[in-house]
Each structure stands twice: as C-alpha cells, then as structure tokens.
Image: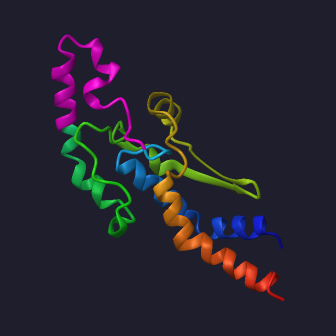
Amino acid sequence: STLNDAVSSEAAQTSDVILSLNRDQMLYGRDAYGNVLKPDYLDDPFFQQFEDPLGVAIEYKKMKMKLEDMHHAIIRFQSIQLFPDKSPDTPNLLVNGNWFMNYLFINISKEGYEIDSTGIVAPDIEQKYGKVFGLAPESKAYYWNGFLRRALLEHYEKNMAK
C-alpha cells in the first residue's frame, strides 16, 4: 500500500476527529484558515435594514451570548483549546435554533478529504463568512501530531523498513 492509502485509511478511521476539529474551530468563531469570522455582529450588513441597525445588532448579540455556555459545552477538544475564546461580537453560526454544523460530513479520497454540510443554510454561511469547511492550521497541526504522524510511522515500519 502507498502513503496515500495510509493517509486516507487513517482519515477514514478518524473522520469523527476531523469533523470535531472543524466543528470546534467554528464554535471558537474561526474559519478554515484560523481567522476570526467576519463580519461580526456589529458590522453585519443584515442589520442595516432596520431603523436602528446598531441597537438591533446589540440585542441580537445579547441573545446569542445567552447561548454561549451551551456552545462551549459541545466543544470536543476543550482540554487542548486550539483557539482563544471568541469575542461576544463574533458570530456563533447558530441558525434558526439549529447548528448547521450538526450536518457536517466528510468525503475522503486518495487525493485528500473534503468537509461540507447538508445543512440548508450551509451555502449562505460560506457566502457570508467565507471558507468555514476544512481544518485551520492549528487543527491540522493537532491532527498531524495526534493521529496522522503515528499512522504514517506505522505504515513506514510495516512497508519500508524491510
């Protein structure tokens, strides 16, 4: 078997970890590059339709902040916290009372992997916030050190060291 086989096999066996890392970084308000999601609540063009855009944005932000404990509770890798806690102004990607990230899925091939969502709002989320599907550098480093590196060393020992 090739290195690509070893990588795709490990990714398939640990796809839950990859998806959790992507979900966690969204819960920390980060995109696939590790950047804070923009626009934040106070700069969101959506609120411009209201008579008092800033007032509506602040009320919306307060409502979202009441959910923050619930958000933090579903972060899988809390003990390693790859990102700082998010600012109260950073969007939490909760849409109509539902986590679109509950609908994440992963396609794995020898060329790599692709994360996407079957959530109905997924295209709107990416249009507004940019690329949110995929692992940020911090998440990739964690996955490499905790999973992929070991799998490749095992592959090497089994196939190359003969």
Queried whether the magenta region covers residue 136, the answer comes back as no
Q: Residue furthest front?
A: 161
Figure check: 111 above or below 144: above
Check the picture and name the quadrant holding the C terminus: bottom right
Horizontal side, residue 119 vs residue 112: left or right: left
**In this orientation, which residue lies closer to the viewer: 131 or 56?**
131
- Location of residue 116 (image quadrant): top right
Judging depth in this view, the residue of 96 and 2 nearest the camera is 2
Up/down of 47 relative to 89, above or below = above
Q: Quadrant of residue 61?
A: top left
Judge from the rendering whether residue 80 lies leftward or rightward of residue 61; answer left or right. right
Instruction: Give the residue at x 58% y 68%.
Output: 14
At which x and y percent is residue 15?
Answer: 59, 63
Residue found at x 66% / y 70%: 10
Question: Which residue is nearer to you in this view: 6 or 33?
Answer: 33
User: Residue drawn at (52%, 52%), measured in percent from left and top?
Assistant: 135
How many numbered markers are drawn?
0
Give the percent coordinates (x, y) of residue 132: 49, 42
Decide if residue 15 is on the left or right side of residue 46.
right
Q: Specify the color scheme.
A: rainbow
**What residue appears at the point 61 percent right and 70 percent down from the top-left corner?**
148
Single out the residue that lies furthest toward the bottom: 162
Q: Which residues are magenta?
A: 35-62
Q: Position of residue 34 (x, y in %)?
A: 44, 47
Asked if the magenta segment contains residue 44, the reply would be yes
In the rendered image, the quadrant that contains the N terminus is bottom right
Q: Name the dominant secondary structure of the magenta segment.
A: helix
Q: Is residue 75 above or below residue 67?
A: below
In the picture, residue 100 is in which quadrant?
top left
Q: Residue 57: x percent and y percent?
A: 22, 26
